[in-house]
């Protein structure tokens, strides 16, 4: 009798495909230049310098979608939200919520595991100035579509920032679940429930610009995650 594939196997094959992607010349050139030049603090470390695959629990009920890998964070470590201040803030919140086994993420080999959560991004390569172009987001979009389809227990998507919010709404539309018009506006704590689609919760991105200015506080992120939990349990 043929062995039944586990939920993680199709996701692993998709991750391998993502890592090989060279579809966007500007992003390929930038991510590889950053990996070659390096930041002085990490001069002795190898950089990943490739598209960054998603990370987490294949049985996740909550999917977190960010913008893109950080140039010296995930583009260096090869794991989403790993190795920079944004990741420190996010993983601390996930740990408080019981979704992460430890409150920090420093490398792909640090033993961190997620339970009930999956972390991905609208753009898989580090973009210059953290700003992917519309055509680059469009080329990456099929990866998000396929990922969402391969997460059988997903119930809620948390969009970290306005670009991720728009990317998720477009993914829903491509799957046959368009949002009402006018399109739902992004906001921290905003919730959208489109018939047939996963619930969508908005959160400010845990970037340094947001966390250091107080625009996003730990309590605010905790509250958004609690709302996602509530929706996932319904």
Image: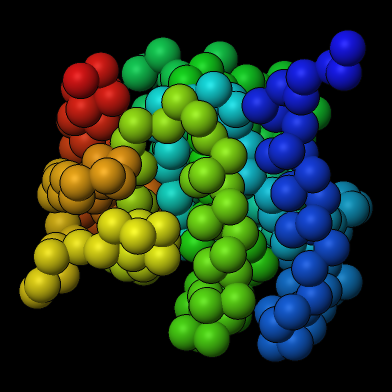
Residue 194 horizontal side relative to residue 225, left or right: left
On the image, the x and y values in percent for residue 37 come to 84, 73
Q: Which residue lies at the image location 82% right of the left edge and 50% below the top edge?
A: 16
Of 207 and 203, nearer the camera is 203
Q: Quadrant of the N terminus?
A: top right
Residue 25 horizontal side relative to residue 61, left or right: right
Residue 161 horizontal side relative to residue 186, left or right: right
On the image, the x and y values in percent for residue 219 come to 20, 31
Residue 131 visible here: yes
25 up-or-down from 14: above or below? below
130 up-or-down from 64: above or below? below
Of 59 and 189, nearer the camera is 59
Q: Quadrant of the C terminus?
A: top left
On the image, the x and y values in percent for residue 61 come to 41, 26
Residue 82 visible here: no
Q: Which residue lies at the image location 58% right of the left edge and 52% below the top edge?
A: 146
Of 84 and 31, nearer the camera is 31
Q: Which residue lies at the image location 52% right of the left edge and 44% below the top edge?
A: 149
Q: Which residue lies at the image location 85% right of the left edge and 17% below the top edge?
A: 3
On the image, the x and y values in percent for residue 92 come to 44, 27
84 up-or-down from 136: above or below? above
Q: Quadrant of residue 128?
A: bottom right
74 up-or-down from 58: above or below? below
Of 134 and 106, nearer the camera is 134
Instruction: Indicate the colouring scheme.
Output: rainbow
């Amino acid at each position: 009798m043929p062995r039944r594939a586990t939920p993680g196997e199709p996701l692993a094959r998709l991750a391998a495909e993502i890592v090989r992607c060279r579809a966007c010349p500007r992003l390929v050139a930038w991510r590889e230049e950053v990996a070659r030049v390096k930041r002085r603090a990490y001069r002795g470390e190898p950089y990943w310098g490739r598209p960054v695959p998603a990370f987490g629990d294949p049985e996740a009920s909550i999917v977190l979608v960010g913008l893109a890998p950080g140039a010296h964070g995930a583009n260096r470590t090869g794991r989403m939200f790993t190795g920079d201040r944004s990741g420190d803030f996010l993983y601390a919140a996930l740990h408080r919520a019981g979704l992460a086994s430890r409150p920090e993420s420093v490398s792909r080999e640090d033993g961190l595991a997620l339970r009930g959560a999956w972390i991905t991004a609208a753009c898989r390569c580090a973009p210059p100035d953290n700003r992917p172009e519309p055509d680059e987001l469009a080329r990456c979009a099929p990866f998000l579509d396929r990922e969402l389809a391969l997460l059988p227990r997903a119930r809620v998507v948390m969009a970290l920032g306005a670009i991720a919010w728009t990317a998720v709404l477009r993914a829903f539309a491509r799957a046959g679940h368009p949002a009402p018009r006018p399109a739902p506006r992004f906001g921290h704590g905003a919730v959208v429930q489109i018939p047939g689609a996963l619930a969508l919760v908005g959160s400010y991105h845990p970037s340094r610009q947001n966390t250091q200015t107080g625009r996003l506080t730990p309590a605010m992120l905790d509250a958004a995650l609690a709302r996602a939990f509530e929706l996932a349990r319904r």
